[in-house]
Image (tube, helix red, strand yellow):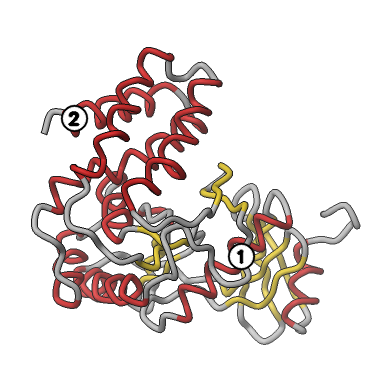
Amino acid sequence: MDDRGESPGAVAARLTGRTTTDEGPLSGALTEVALDDGRSVMVKRADSPEEARAEVAGLRWLAEAGTVRVPTLHGQDGPWLVTDLIERGRPNREAALALGRALAGLHLAGAPAFGSAPPGGPREAYIGRAPMRNAEGAEWPEWYAEHRVLPYLRRAVDGGTITVAEAEVIERFCARLPGLAGPAEPPARLHGDLWNGNVLWGADGHARLIDPAAHGGHRETDLAMLHLFGCPHLDEVLRGYEQVAPLAEGWSDRTGLHQLFPLLVHAVLFGRGYAEQALSTAKAALER
């Protein structure tokens, strides 16, 4: 229940306009609620109203591209949001190929600038449980260093996860980014937190994207995150992607550049193991 004594079932009834018949926990913040018309919805309680608003704005922005699939949104109120519950299936090559094509279309839908927030989304947003500021920039290397890499490096140093001496490696990486970033790309419409846990493989044979940290960014960033944490049939995802929007030459050699951001976020949230991986990634980029 929330501070007003409202249960997930009551939230679902209010935001769907249906009577609820049952509810049960899925995980800490998620509850499955059955409706009287036979459907089930997922009720999520975010840590704050701002976090819920950022997620809803991101889902709507992804859906507006008309390419990727996201769960149907029934509403948001305060920290609560209600979406359709996706019946889970097994990933297959056909669904992965379609996901790659859809992801390319999402990126091609574009964004006003690097760092642009989704329409209606807050400037002070989130990636997972970590704060993420959507501040705009004109050039990707400078924007990426200033607004995606260095803020989390500072947090990691302040938290004792990375030493001041170690931080110099990542600072050198940031200084060299303009020469490492490859050909200039226009701002893409990113999911922004595209690890495999945020790809739901539906029983209907279609993949859906959840929990976005959506913003304007470099399209290779989404692909790098799929690489970082693993994705079933990733080769088919990439094949489908390149059928729609071929990647610039050398993109696979730049994967580590884009992985540094999520690695530092994970270092801040989860500790030293990810910090060591971030430092190794920065050193490898500097040796190219």
Picture coordinates of residue 259 (x, y %)?
30, 43
At x 18%, y 46%, the residue is: 254
For the image shown, how many numbered marks are present on the structure? 2
Q: Nearer the viewer, residue 102 or 16?
A: 102
Q: Are marks 1 and 2 in contact (CB under 8 Å)?
A: no
Task: Give the side of residue 14 with respect to residue 254, left or right.
Answer: right
Q: Residue 262: percent from the left, percent from the top?
A: 39, 42
Instruction: Bin the neighbour count of mark 1 within 10 Å (Cα to Cα): few under 14, some 14-19, many 20 and up.
Output: many
What SS does tag 2 mark?
helix
Q: Residues within 10 Å of mark 2 (few under 14, many from 20)?
A: some
In this rendered view, identify the residue nearer to me: 197 or 25: 197
Three-letter amino acid code at disc 1?
Gly
Name the residue beneath numbered marker 1: 121
Lateral position of residue 226 relative to residue 66, left or right = left
Residue positioned most to the front: 138
Which quadrant: the C terminus? top left
Q: Write down the residue under mark 2.
A: 286
| Image position of 240 (left or right of 116) | left
User: Image quadrant of residue 203?
Assistant: bottom left
